Image (cartoon, rainbow, N blue to C red):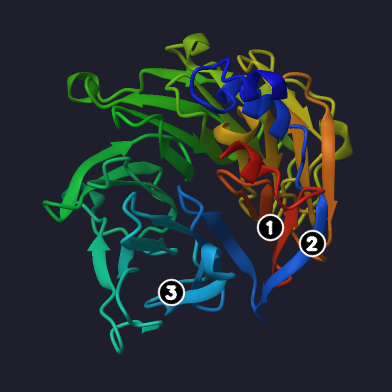
Amino acid sequence: MLAGRESNYSGRGRFSSADRCHLLSRYLPVNGPWLIDQMPSRAYVSQFSADGSLFVAGFQGNHIKIYNVDKGWKVQKNILTKSLRWTITDTSLSPDQHYLVYASMSPIVHIVNVGSSETESLANVTEIHDGLDFTSNDDGGYSFGIFSVKFSTDGRELVAGTSSDSIYVYDLEANKVSLRILAHASDVNTVCFADETGHLIYSGSDDSFCKVWDRRCLNANGKPSGVLMGHLEGITFIDTRGDGRYFISNGKDQTIKLWDIRKMSSNVTRNPGYRSFEWDYRWMDYPPQAKDLNHPCDQSVATYRGHSVLRTLVRCFFSPAFSTGQKYIYTGSHNACVYVYDLVSGAQVATLKHHKSPVRDCSWHPFHTTLVSSSWDGDVVKWESGGSSYSSLFG
């Protein structure tokens, strides 16, 4: 491969994307960790921006910090939030990285100008944090919380999953809710756009179902394009592969599942007979007798086990396309670790141990072999591969 690069075999003077992924995916971010920050409250959110230049960490104690990764992890924005209920449940950076939205257990999502000159962003004191009201005319005055919020690829819309069993789409140009879908029979814990077109939305709920929504035909019937069954308990998070076909979900049944929407069905099959126990994931351990149960109508492509999903909406992700070809799946865990699984074999290829409390969120740098984890112990730490310059070889 080196000889091919030197002789310009590809005609581009560098490794092909396939060669780059083949080599870089062998280097997992397992060394460390190195402390980035330590806060006195629980960390709920930690995510790299799409280009990896910024990193966002959200804490229960009303704080969101945005770090400039390229400038030695210097704090670029220290945001003290407004009208926070319980905790920051989610944040999302706009595609141009000019704006950040943050949500809590409230129907109001706040938006902050990330590109302003102010480092300290105290809500409505040093800067205005505009409120985007997600209530609509058919809510009946019900006050709900928002568990998940995401920008569309073009930055013109937000999609949100809520405790009102609904999905909301907010039009930022019109400054109003453009769509409400009564989507599930319980809390919608997670939503995302399937790909850059914005037509498809994936959702996951405490009713244990993943659903696919095509906005191009919603006005006709108001029903999902399909339902995917397989989880035995509620779903905490969904991550899309970005191809409009595959996604993964984390479930309170202590599994991650890989889905292919070509296998979805139009009807929901309920089989209450598989559950002979009552439990609450917020304060109870998963019943031992349930660990070997399988859904009788499991439509998933693969299942990954080893981590634990308790107390909070633990998140899972595909590894980056640039450096790994999305070869891996990684997830936080209630037992204070980060787990990395091989997508195809399902094998557990790495376990990152440092934290002393649940790891709700973690994020793999889009181009470098660096992973950052955040925990309820307040620590935000980074993990790296055996060398610091592997990625520069493949720029």
Q: Quadrant of residue 293?
A: top right
Query: Disc 1, disc 3: CB below 8 Å?
Result: no
Which quadrant is the N terminus positioned in? Answer: top right
Give the amino acid type for the residue marked by disc 3 in the picture. Answer: Leu
Residue 198 can be seen, yes or no: yes
Which is nearer the N-term, disc 1 or disc 2? Answer: 2
Q: Position of residue 362 (x, y in %)?
A: 64, 52
Q: Quadrant of residue 250?
A: top right
Asked which secondary structure carries label 3, the reply is loop
Which is nearer the N-term, disc 1 or disc 3? Answer: 3
Which is nearer the N-term, disc 3 or disc 2? Answer: 2
Left or right, 211 with reference to 179: right
How many angstroms separate mark 1 from mark 3 (CA)?
A: 23 Å
Pointer 3 residue? 84
Q: Residues within 10 Å of mark 1 (few under 14, many from 20)?
A: many
Asked which secondary structure carries label 2, the reply is strand
Q: Residues within 10 Å of mark 3 (few under 14, many from 20)?
A: many
